[in-house]
Image: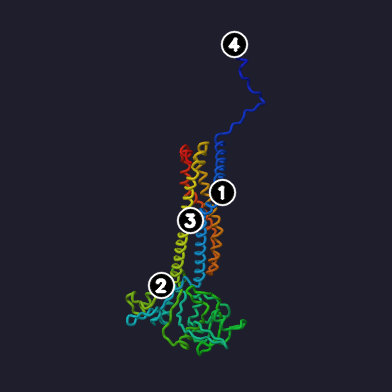
Amino acid sequence: MKIMRDERERTVQPLPPSSKPVAKRRPQQHRRAHGFQGMFQSTGSALQALRANLLRSLLTSLGIIIGVGAVIIMIAISEGNTSSINSRLSTLNPLQLTIRSGSTSTGGVRGGAGTLQSLTQADADALGQLQHVSAVSPTLNANGQIVYSNQNWSSSVQGVYPGYQQIGSWQLQEGNFFTQADEQSGTTVAVLGQTVVDNLFTPPGIDPIGQQIRIGTVTFTVVGTLASKGSTGFGSNADDIVYIPFSTAQQRLSGSQFVSSIVLTADNSGDVNSVQSAAQALLEQRHNISNPASDDFTIQNASQVLSTVQATAQSLTILLVGVAAVSLIVGGIGIMNIMLVSVTERTREIGIRIAIGARQRDVLAQFLIEAFVLSALGGIVGLIIGPIGAFAIAHANGYPLVIDPLSILIAFGVSALVGIVFGFYPAQRAARMNPIEALRTE
């Protein structure tokens, strides 16, 4: 009985009600805290290792710097060039078809396009009767010296129908275009482009409307001036032009029964190809041509020209970006090379870390962070150099500076991805190192 009493006395008494048990950290929270601490330590070790070899780190990032800068410059050049081309081609009407005479062939010697006189005013009038044709006009070139007072200027003079204003999408700066009544009566009136106005009516301030000009030996009255269009995109100035009624050009200046070309427009984009086919069939019928290979004319589709130019510009962009991307790959290979060298140099350090408790993922994270920092720093410097280089090239070549923010984000993202991808193998090699063998390394 005494023994049992002593055992009861030695029994541990319960804690007082006021005492609280010590809270234990959950395993998941413990792992998360340890993970954050390990990542912080790995980041610190990675930055310390990069600072220890600062010059080598900068040289390693040089490939990424050049790659990111090259990508931004190439995309900016391509976008600027495309913008410049599109602005020049804006004078083209995608609904327009241009029909030109074929080429002559004498003794095996072939002339250029348009040297064969095969198109007539009657052809143009017949084409105007086709379905889905909204406007048509023959054109007759009658180039000559234009004289006003004591000023003169050599320009392109074309005889056209009044509907040519719609076909060419011309806007009037002042006055009016000539009318159908002018065409029918062969009135000597003219509409001038802005380049002609600027060179004839000097000093500035002279109102050209109502003024008398002379083309060759014929006097014309200016009834309108055209708003400026600029370059046509084919090396010629669209504003260096004088339009006169077709009948006037034919009777007073040229005397030819043939026309230089015929231009027409479809009523909507979906009918352009069908109008082209119908125009070809009609002209073959009128010219008694049974074999399309023997056509004495050619039809130029403005929408096809625009599509070809845009496709070419897109292909050029892909080519330039592909060439620039090679620099990023070369930079990534450089990062891999330096990281492998770094792993070899720090073999003993890696062994000590593993021996005192560092896990494989800690070592892997450290070297991945080093590779990422190298590529990210190179990407940031490249983001600074790229726009500067793009501005210099655009300014030197007269292109508009077009920098797409998306291209900057993509270039930086790819540079960071390159660092991780090419840094993974060296990091994995360091993480799988045997600590015993590593500690033996001198």
Nearer mark to the viewer, of 4 and 1: 1
Mark drawn on residue 328: 3
Query: Mark 2 highlights which residue?
Result: 276
Nearer mark to the viewer, of 2 and 3: 3
Q: For the residue marked with disc 2, what is the amino acid?
A: Gln
Nearer mark to the viewer, of 2 and 1: 1
Residues packed near mark 4 inside 10 Å, few (<14), some (14 to 19) or many (20 plus): few
Q: CA distance from mark 2 to mark 1?
A: 70 Å
Q: Earlier in the sequence, mark 4 or mark 2?
A: 4
Above or below, 227 against 28 in this view is below
Q: CA distance from mark 3 to mark 1?
A: 23 Å
Residues packed near mark 1 inside 10 Å, few (<14), some (14 to 19) or many (20 plus): few
102 or 147: nearer the viewer: 147
- Residue 323 shows in this picture: yes
Q: Earlier in the sequence, mark 3 or mark 1?
A: 1
Nearer mark to the viewer, of 4 and 2: 4
- Where disc 1 sits, the SS reads helix
Q: Quadrant of the N terminus?
A: top right
Q: CA distance from mark 4 to mark 2?
A: 120 Å
Mark drawn on residue 51: 1
Q: Report which quarter residue 279 is drawn in.
A: bottom left
Q: Position of residue 47 (x, y in %)?
A: 56, 47
Mark drawn on residue 3: 4
